[in-house]
Amino acid sequence: MLQQTVYVLCAATSLACAWLLMRGYRQSAVRLLFWSGLCFFGLAAENALLFVDLATPVWFDLSLPRRLTGLAALSLLVYGLVWDSK
Amino acid sequence: MASFLMGATAMACAVAGLFFLRFWRETGDRLFAIFAAAFWLFGLTRIALAVRPSPNVHEISEHEFYIYLVRLAVFALILLAVLDKNRPRTKAETP
Amino acid sequence: MISAPRASFLALGKGGSRASEDGAKGKTLGQLDDRLQRFIVENIASVAQLEVLLLLKQHPQRAWNAEDVARALYTGPTLIGAELADWESRGLLVSQPDQPGHYRYAPRSPELADTVNKLEQAYKERRVAVITDIYSKPVDKIRTFADAFRIRKEP
């Protein structure tokens, strides 16, 4: 129960950050906000997958897509930081 | 494969944290210090998942109690940074 | 056939010097130190505001009021009062308790003092760069990132 709450809270926080950053990107057109917004969407997805993973049977392992999502999200962030932080 | 993914993710977290650390130094904005700590903490969980020897046949996964507790701390820190940014402030305070 | 390589060699040379010219031009046209640029963008909206600060900085022992400043800068005192109060709220001036409406230059922290020193120097040596940054408000990507997390946008 605690575990599911944690994943939901983390996903919600991540989603909120993603929304704030995307709104900021729409207003300012600063690309860094776009890439970091995508990152937070990805992290929200990762947390969502963790939540779903609890409900699926043991043989249906979501660990690979989960981890790939996390890596992809962070790669987008690093890309944005490297190229668009002046 | 799992170790590789965890290692790569940990590295990305470390790099992101370093960027945020630099931003904190440049602007003095607390938000970046908190973000740096959050991303590094997240990276630590990846390292723990990659490095920790499995006590039994099954691999250690994110569903371990301590791992997802630290995950909660990571996002609590991020939430804290956002709330801190939205505190009402006087003009004299640094943003 | 022989001219072609020479032409390209000349082009290379020309390109090289143009690049260095552009580099120098780029420096004059507003490549101030990041921290300085940030200070200007966050605190200074007009050249008059800057001149008020620098005037008080040049005479730190003296307590100025709006009329004194207006006379020294050859402007009207109406807006000066607001600008003096503004700098006080930003922690660069201190109002005198015994003299109402009088201010002295007294930066709140050594980093602030250092930044204003650099600003004074930049205003002497690279006035165009400073003025450009005051009025063009260059986009600070990092600050925009932090500001994105403000739920309600402040003016």
Image (spheres, coloured by chain):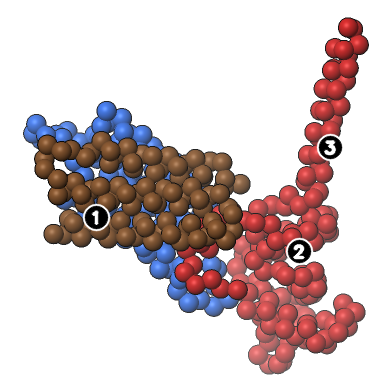
Kindly state the secondary structure of the residue where label 2 is placed: helix
Q: Colour of chain B?
A: blue
Residue type (three-letter) at the residue carrying disc 1: Tyr
- For the question of whether residue B10 can be seen, the reply is no
Q: Establish if A26 lies above or below A50.
A: below
**Percent position (x, y) of residue C70?**
85, 82
Pointer 3 local density, CA inside 10 Å: few below 14, some 14–19, many at least 20: few
* Residue position marked by numbered label 1 in the rendering: A7
Q: Which mark is residue C21?
A: 3
Residue type (three-letter) at the residue carrying disc 2: Tyr
**Percent position (x, y) of residue A64?**
25, 36
Q: Chain of mark 3?
A: C
Tell me what residue is drawn at x 54 percent, y 78 percent: B90
Q: Which chain is brown?
A: A
**Percent position (x, y) of residue A49?**
25, 47
Tell me what residue is drawn at x 34 percent, y 60 percent: A13
* Residue position marked by numbered label 2 in the rendering: C135
Asked whether the residues under marks 3 and 1 belong to the same chain, the reply is no
